[in-house]
Amino acid sequence: VILLIVLALKLIQLFKRLTRTSREDHGAHIILQGWLWKQGEVRSSWKKRFFKLTETEIQWFRNEAATYAIGITQLAKCFHVQSYKSLLDKPQLGKGKREPDNVFIVKHKNRTFVLE
């Protein structure tokens, strides 16, 4: 339970660019929502997705009006959240690319999410 609270607090801090809301969605209170870039796991391309953070999960959608999430991950199954700047083994950046300011990594039991 403490780990879940710490994880949720870290996610809240890292979701600074998202807008605050008090709207209810499918019975879950949305803490933060907004647009982020998500790196694909199979293809390493970045896709813009609309994210919602609740007390128990992170959901992402193709657009703000979508009613069905194209992805959901339970916070209880996430075991690590880390900002890009704190990584010791950083991935190589392309020539002329700057180090990203707002990238963070969420490690889940089955996969790793990279969000900006």
Image (cartoon, grey):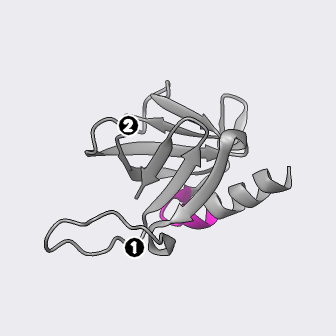
Identity, as a three-letter code, of the amino acid under mark 2: Asn
Q: Image quarter for residue 80?
A: bottom right
Residue 47's x, y, as percent?
30, 44
Which secondary structure lies at badge 1? loop
Tell me if residue 4 comes above or below residue 60 in the rendering.
Answer: below
Q: CA distance from mark 2 to mark 1?
A: 24 Å
Q: Amino acid at mark 1?
A: Asp
Crowd tier of the residue under label 2, counting other residues whose Cα lies within 10 Å: few below 14, some 14–19, many 20 or above: some
Q: Secondary structure at mark 2?
A: loop
Coordinates of residue 37 in the picture (x, y in percent): 36, 51
**In this image, 71 relative to 38: left or right?**
right
Image point 43% across, 52% down: which residue? 114
Residue receiving disc 2:
63
Mark number displayed over residue 93: none
Magenta stretch, residue numbers:
12-19
Residue found at the far front of this picture: 89
- In the image, 55 versus 19, the foreground residue is 55
Mark nearer the viewer, 2 or 1: 1
Q: Residue at horizontal 48%, vertical 64%?
A: 17
The C terminus: image quadrant: bottom left
Residue pictured at 34% horizontal, 41% vertical: 40
Classify 10 Å Cα crowding around label 1: few (below 14), some (14-19), many (20 and above): few
In the image, 16 versus 113, the foreground residue is 113
The residue that mark 1 highlights is 101
Q: Earlier in the sequence, mark 2 or mark 1?
A: 2
Whether residue 61 appears in magenta in the rendering, the answer is no
